[in-house]
Amino acid sequence: MKLYQIYALISMLFAGLTSVMAKAGLKNVSSDIGLTVRTTVVFGIVGLNVLLFQPLKEFNQLTSKDVIFLAISGFTTSISWIFYYKAIKMGNVSEVALIDKGSIIITMLLSIFLLQEQFTWKMAAGSALIISGLLVLTLK
């Protein structure tokens, strides 16, 4: 198994824990308060990771284009999290998480068209299965 695949599996495990822990933590507060607490912890841990494990001189390598794209990513992450937390506060976290994973289709399409990543038939088959699952979940 490749290192990036191991990282992806670790990410998958913690992403699964994230949603369940968030739903449990939203019992007595609004989704916006819960998200604020979560984001504060994320900022602290990511900042500590950079301080301990990354050479700070890498900041000098950032171009203005890099900063713009990362800032847009931060903006889109914020909007995604705001609505994700609203959804898990109101609905079943298992259903919301499955619908949210439909973002894989958007990611795949954008990576093909904007990043010129290769399209494969395995991706097409996987996408068709994801879309089928979304239809099963969302249609009455």
Image: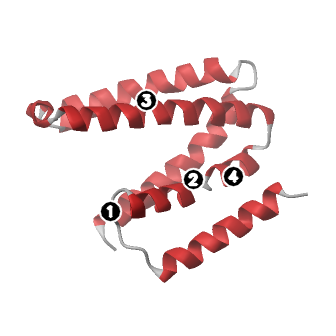
| Amino acid type shown at disc 2 | Ser
Looking at the image, is mark 3 or mark 1 earlier in the sequence? 1
Q: Which residue is drawn at 20% across and 31% down?
A: 64
Q: Nearer the viewer, residue 100 or 55?
A: 100
Q: Mark 2 points at which residue?
A: 103
Provide the secondary structure element on which disc 3 rests: helix
Q: Which quarter of the figure has residue 71?
A: top left
Q: Residue at x 68, y 54 (%)?
A: 98
Which image quadrant is residue 3 in? bottom left
Relative horizontal placement of residue 102, taking residue 9 as reference (left or right): right
Dot in front, 2 or 3: 2
Q: Do the residues labelled 4 and 2 touch (CB within 8 Å)?
A: no
Percent position of residue 26, x then y = 70, 26
Relative to residue 136, is residue 58 depicted above or below?
above
- Do the residues under discs 3 and 1 have CB atoms within 8 angstroms? no
Compared with residue 131, is residue 138 higher up or lower down, i.e. above or below? above
**3D distance between C-alphas at marks 2 and 1:** 20 Å
Q: Which color scheme is applied?
A: secondary structure
Label annotation for residue 42:
3
Q: Name the residue under label 1.
A: 4
Q: Which residue lies furthest to the bottom in this view?
A: 121
What is the C-alpha distance between the residues marked 4 and 3?
A: 23 Å
What amino acid is found at the position of numbered circle 1 in the picture? Answer: Tyr
Q: Which amino acid does label 3 sit on?
A: Val
Residue at the extreme front:
113
C-alpha distance separating marks 3 and 1: 21 Å
State the CA–CA distance, disc 2 to disc 3: 21 Å
Q: Where is residue 87 in the image (x, y as percent from the top left)?
A: 72, 36
Q: Report helix, strand or loop for mark 1.
A: helix
